[in-house]
Amino acid sequence: MFLPDIIKLPNYRRLYIAGATSELGSFITDTALMLFIFRITDNQNSSLGYLKSTFLIFLVFGIILGGPIGERFNRKKVLVLCEIFRAPFVFLLATTANPYLIVLFSGVIAFFTGIFRPSRQALMNELVPPDKMKAANGLFGSTIAILHLVGPLFGAYAFSHFNGVKEILAFDLLTYVLGTILLLRINYSHAIAKKSNDNIFKDIQNGLKFVKNRGDLLSLLTNSFVAGLSVGILVPLLLPFTIEFLGKGEKEYGILLGVFGLGGLIGGSLSEKLSSRFSSSKLACYTLLMEPIFFLIWINVFNWIYSAVILFAWGVVVFIRITSQLNHVSENVETNQLSNVHSLLELSFLLPNIAGGLMIGITGGFLSTREFLIFSSAMFFLTTFPRLFLKEFQLLINYEGKQVNRETFIE
């Protein structure tokens, strides 16, 4: 009775549950593995760096290849195979306490996760009627916000409760089994008809050319990049800022992350309602322009309660933008380019996140926490508002392209 109407579509429901449970298992496992490898390496910080950096590098390569793979092959089969290929490596993680093997197996899982994501987003557009895509993207945005919130909490609690990772990995393995079963039940027989002698790397180049020739998409990806860079700097510095300037500890830091995620949950839900009044392209631009303002306000507020309120509102705005970006892609990108564009959209946020973390690592000794945050917020402001006058930004905010009609497989 309380479930969104979009869940009543059987094909979409199977894809949604398969994706959500898989992501939940991954969030829980990632946190538990961080704690586990920290323990078995006698609390060496470098082990956390190796695990996280390897995970991200493999994830990036998977996403890069995931775009053209999703265009060349049947997307349902791509998702099923990714679930099947990830499962053995989850099992192998449960059999070892060797930190090098843990890093390697985690990276391989991340690689197939990267391939999985663009095809999942593209397939969603083929399983949902166009008039319900905004609801589907809104539910996806809200779900990701919830998983970002509860996944790490469950992972840390489960690791402490079980004093290890085997039970957690068993749960993760079950999510892949469930996902495989649900994906196989999706009524979808459409194979991408792409008769091309080009290799996958040529397909990647063609995807980049497609975006380059679409000013609205180029601006959308640039927006995601500049926001991703600021977030990549903000998140690692949130804990020291909480301790140094808000006078609080790790518990309050966790609450701040939680209220940001709660704001994301509200934002994902609000996006569908707002999209009835504003176009997806306008929402994506308006919310982006609000984000550097929230950043500038937040770094100048030293009351923990007020800081939490600002982060909550910021979370609302961020997830309205994310959902609106997905809506714009769903409405205006041809089916044979969906996987490529979703791949590039993922990368446009992930790569600057990595770059932001590297910037902190390289220059962190020269700037204090607040100085670095001031620099980041100023950079966010200066890479956002001057772009208002650029042709690509104007093409996006005033986009009036014809909405794409695509074949859908609705059960």
Image (cartoon, grey):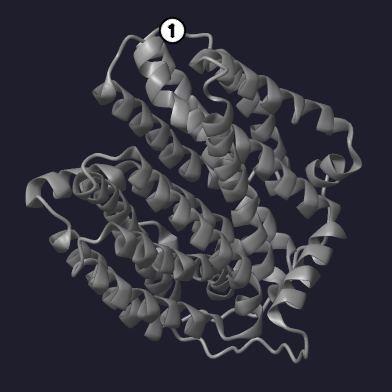
Vertically, is 129 above or below 367?
Answer: below
Amino acid found under the numbered disc labelled 1: Phe
> In the picture provided, is 58 more to the left or to the right than 287?
left
Residue 221 image position (x, y, % from top left): 71, 49
Residue at image point 48% right, 67% down: 111
Q: In which quadrant is the N terminus drawn?
A: bottom left
Quadrant for residue 182, please give it.
bottom left
Image quarter for residue 207? Answer: bottom right
Horizontal and vertical percent for residue 206?
80, 71
Q: Position of residue 411 (x, y in %)?
A: 46, 81
Q: Secondary structure at mark 1?
A: loop
Depth order, front residue of 280/300: 300
Q: Badge 1 local density, few (<14 within 10 Å), some, or many (20+)?
A: some
The reply to whether residue 405 is in sight is: no
Where is mark 1, residue-wise? Answer: 302
Q: How many marks?
A: 1
Question: Which of 4/61 is in front?
Answer: 61
